[in-house]
Amino acid sequence: MTPAVRLQRLVASCYGRMAKREEGNKLIIVITDGCPGDNSGGQIQTMIRESHRKNIDIFGVGIAGCAKYLEAIYGGRTIAIDDLNELPGKMAALVKRHVRFV
């Protein structure tokens, strides 16, 4: 199984679980440190398009130079991190923007 197929399966599993939940807003964050060798993000792109109906936001966070790959899959829902020290601040900002706290 290729890394891209594993990623698709993991995102699909998480999406399926989140879609069943009753909370108003849900957030899936995919963090990766590499780019799969194939171009198989189609299933994830489909989940992203369908996710709006279920109040799920799906984001891709790329560490170490895979921004172009993530942009192709997640579009505007991509965060590129070149320095691992940026991760905590960018993740906190993402959650703050997209999750409504009760």
Image: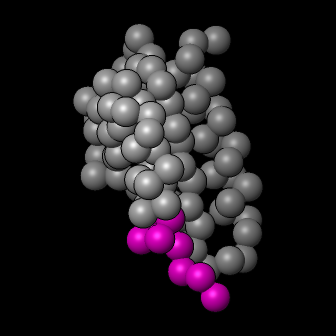
- Residue furthest toward the front? 85
Residue 60's place in the image compared with 36, above or below, is below
Quadrant containing the N terminus in the rendered view: top right
Magenta highlight range: 95-102
**Residue 27 x, y percent position in the rendering:** 56, 61
**Is 97 above or below relative to 6?**
below
Question: In front here: 5 or 92?
Answer: 92
Do we see residue 53 in this rendering? Answer: no
- For the residue pair 47 and 11, the one nearer the viewer reads as 11
Regarding residue 99, the answer to whether it shows in the image is yes
Say which residue appears at 49% left-offset and 61% top-offset. 92
Q: How is the image coloured?
A: one colour
Q: Quadrant of the C terminus?
A: bottom right
The x and y percentages for residue 5 are 57, 22
The magenta stretch spans residue 96: yes
Which residue in the rendered view is the most extreme toward the bottom?
102
> Residue 42: where, in percent of width, then height?
42, 34
Q: Residue 10 in the image: x percent, y percent? A: 65, 36
For residue 34, what is the image quadrant?
Answer: top left
Q: What residue is rendered at 41% in x and 11% in y?
A: 37
Q: What residue is drawn where x is 59% and y is 67%?
A: 26
In the rendered structure, the answer to whether residue 11 lies left or right of residue 36 reads right
Q: Is residue 18 magenta?
A: no
